[in-house]
Image (cartoon, grey):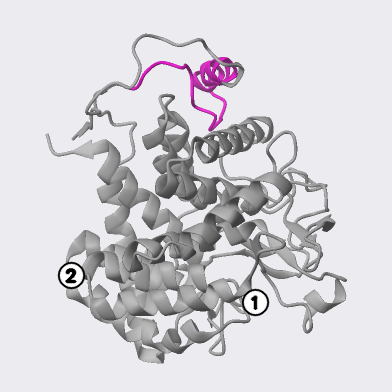
């Protein structure tokens, strides 16, 4: 195997070395002497083909291991007619909620990725069986997570099969999602605030950084329907979030609460981070992924620049903390005795692989290091263990005392996605 070359060089020569590039070069030198880092962007050199070496990631080996593990989980899921989410305090599998669960699409998406990888119909059959469990949720208008749910499941299904029925499900879900858009605010509302813990926060129109991940469904809906309204809402939401969610260093707040009548900002807070001004790790990953996707569909350079700056922030933080697998919050008070969040790392590395497609600077060294850490015995389950989840040590929400240091189906999903992207982008048969 060798790395893919690029069809053309976008720039010639060696560019001026940036601060982060120089810092990364110095740090990588330290790594060679025995320390760890995942800030691996040593220079601003134009990308070029390099020889495949034994130190590079072997995505086929890792995908085959994931296939073996999820084969057992799929069998268990079909037997129980439920969708795996995580494990409970007793170490037993915890299924997604049947009324609605924002994570219900991720396991299905993993099955579709493995069908795409193996062409084994068991994955397709399993995905088609289980995604019917939440088909009716496409009509829900009380939750912003329809993008998460239906893009990962039916979106991947349509990509692989081109089944028009799957496209119609996506369009119905997109129509439900845009009912939550407020043109005065310029955003899609995240949570309703009349019930549950959200009702105790004095919010009126909360918008969370996670909501950037729902925009891909809208971009796809415009492409599939030739109706620009979905795309226009997605762009407006991305612009408003870019303006209001990010600090000067390109870290992001988790929650911005707006006045739904005037559109003015009421609060900048957190729900799942350590504090309002701290940097919740998965939130930073959602931002990176979201703006990379926004650039994919619009080619608006503002989104590319935003994604690059978020990536610089994340990678600089991993240098400071000396680990590619971040603590659940970069500012958690008891570091290094805080839980790490593999889900934040898997989301980040998948986004970096796509971002690497659009930039002249290479993120490949960082990508390799993150994937190396995720695929190590420390973070990857042995076959048959961990209730057949692939990755260990993720965090749902510490402030809610929920899903702490456990496997999570979305951590597995983005890890598989990253390996699929890595295989497609960097490796070809010699």
The residue depicted at 31 percent of the width and 58 percent of the height is 65
What residue did someone put label 2 on?
A: 120
Q: Which mark is residue 214?
A: none
The residue depicted at 44 percent of the width and 39 percent of the height is 355
Q: Position of residue 345 (x, y in %)?
A: 54, 48
**Within the image, what quadrant is residue 5 found in?**
top left
Q: Is residue 340 visible?
A: no
Relative vertical location of residue 122 with respect to residue 256 in this rendering, above or below: below
Badge 1 element: loop
* Residue 29 drawn in magenta: yes
Depth check, front residue: 409 or 87: 409
Which image quadrant: the C terminus?
A: top left
Q: Position of residue 188 (x, y in %)?
A: 63, 66
Q: Is residue 302 visible?
A: yes
Badge 2 element: loop
Q: Position of residue 361 (x, y in %)?
A: 44, 24
Give the extent of the magenta segment. 21-47
Relative vertical location of residue 283 with respect to residue 129 in this rendering, above or below: above
Depth check, front residue: 168 or 149: 168
What residue did someone put label 1 on?
A: 89
Q: Residues within 10 Å of mark 2 (few under 14, many from 20)?
A: few
């Amino acid at each position: 195997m060798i790395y893919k070359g690029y069809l053309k060089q976008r720039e010639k020569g060696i560019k001026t070395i940036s601060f982060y590039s120089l810092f990364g070069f110095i740090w990588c030198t330290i790594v060679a002497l025995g320390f760890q880092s995942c800030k691996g962007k040593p220079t601003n050199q134009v990308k070029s083909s390099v020889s495949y070496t034994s130190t590079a990631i072997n995505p086929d080996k890792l995908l085959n291991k994931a296939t073996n593990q999820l084969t057992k989980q799929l069998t268990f899921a079909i037997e129980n007619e439920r969708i795996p989410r995580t494990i409970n305090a007793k170490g037993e599998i915890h299924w997604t909620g049947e009324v609605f669960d924002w994570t219900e699409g991720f396991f299905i998406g993993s099955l579709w990725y493995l069908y795409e990888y193996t062409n084994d119909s068991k994955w397709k059959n399993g995905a088609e069986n289980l995604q019917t469990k939440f088909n009716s949720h496409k009509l829900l208008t009380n939750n912003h997570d329809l993008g998460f749910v239906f893009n990962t499941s039916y979106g991947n299904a349509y990509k692989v099969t081109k089944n028009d029925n799957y496209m119609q499900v996506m369009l119905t879900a997109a129509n439900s999602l845009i009912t939550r858009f407020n043109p005065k605010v310029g955003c899609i509302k995240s949570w309703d605030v009349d019930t549950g813990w959200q009702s105790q926060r004095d919010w009126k129109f909360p918008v969370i950084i996670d909501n950037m991940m729902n925009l891909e469904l809208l971009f796809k809906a415009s492409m599939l329907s030739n109706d620009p309204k979905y795309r226009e809402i997605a762009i407006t939401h991305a612009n408003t979030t870019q303006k209001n969610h990010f600090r000067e260093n390109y870290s992001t707040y988790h929650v911005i609460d707006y006045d739904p009548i005037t559109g003015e900002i009421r609060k900048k807070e957190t729900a799942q981070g350590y504090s309002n001004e701290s940097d919740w790790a998965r939130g930073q990953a959602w931002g990176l992924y979201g703006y990379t996707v926004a650039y994919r569909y619009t080619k608006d350079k503002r989104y590319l620049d935003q994604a690059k700056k978020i990536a610089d922030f994340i990678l600089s933080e991993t240098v400071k903390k000396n680990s590619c697998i971040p603590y659940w919050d970069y500012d958690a008070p008891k570091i290094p005795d805080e839980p790490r969040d593999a889900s934040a790392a898997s989301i980040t590395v998948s986004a970096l692989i796509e971002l690497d497609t659009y930039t002249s600077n290479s993120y490949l060294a960082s990508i390799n290091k993150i994937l190396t850490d995720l695929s190590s015995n420390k973070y990857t389950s042995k076959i048959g263990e961990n209730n057949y989840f692939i990755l260990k040590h993720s965090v749902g929400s510490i402030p809610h005392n929920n899903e702490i240091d456990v496997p999570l189906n979305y951590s597995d999903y983005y890890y598989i996605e990253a390996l699929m992207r890595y295989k497609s982008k960097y490796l070809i048969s010699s």
